[in-house]
Amino acid sequence: MRSRATLPAALAGAALLTGTLFSTPAQAAGGVTIHHVWFDSPGSDNRSNASLNGEWVQIKNTSRSAVSLKGWILKDAANHKYVFRNIRIGAGKTMKVHTGKGTDTASHKYQNRRAYVWNNTSDTATLTKASGAKVDSCSWTTRDPSDKWC
Ligand SMILES: [Ca+2]
Ligand SMILES: [Ca+2]
């Protein structure tokens, strides 16, 4: 029993060590993903600012170092774009990009829109670098509830 339990732990340790040894600077610089999307704002979509801000895309930096998001773009399938300012996302940190108006903080950004951007029926959120190079995307349909873990 005891020896069985130690084997997976040992393997996990080896995998962790391997990951550390073979991690390159290029890999450390990447790792920003679309983590969670709340595409159907809670309650009726009445276009109030609170409702607009109940619609958001959360990104996450899964790498071990901060990543500059300067000029990066978050867009929907219809090409409505949100361009990130000269900001960084810390290692392991998440950041929500809300649809409505608000004052940006480290972990909450606001598109300052007066209309919803993420379709409730189906849509795709795409994150690209300033160059247009795709970083990540996440799609959903009516099969998903009000949100999608990507
Ligand atoms: Ca929506
Ligand atoms: Ca709704």
Image (tube, rainbow, N blue to C red):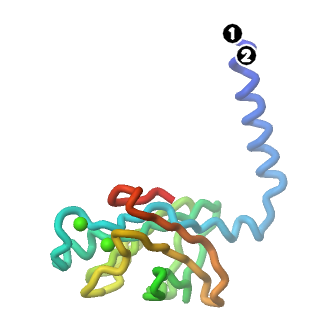
Q: In which quarter of the image is the N terminus?
A: top right
- Left or right: residue 141 compared with residue 17: left
Residue occupying image coordinates x 80% and y 64%:
24
Residue type at mark 2?
Arg
Residue occupying image coordinates x 83% and y 52%:
21
Total numbered circles: 2
- Left or right: residue 86 compared with residue 18: left
Residue occupying image coordinates x 77% and y 50%:
19
Residue type at mark 1?
Met
Figure check: 112 above or below 137: below
Query: Is ligand 1 within 8 Å of the beta carbon of the residue shown at mark 2?
Result: no
Q: Residue 37 carries which label?
A: none
Residue 78 x, y percent position in the rendering: 45, 86
Q: Which mark is residue 1?
A: 1
Q: How crowded is mark 2: few (under 14 residues within 10 Å), some or many (20 or more)?
A: few
**Mark 2 — residue?**
4
Residue 123 x, y percent position in the rendering: 44, 73
The front one of 33 and 91 is 33
Residue 55 x, y percent position in the rendering: 31, 70
Q: How far apart are marks 1 and 2 (CA)?
A: 5 Å
Residue occupying image coordinates x 55% and y 77%:
127
Which quadrant holds residue 142? bottom left
Quarter of the picture for ligand 1? bottom left
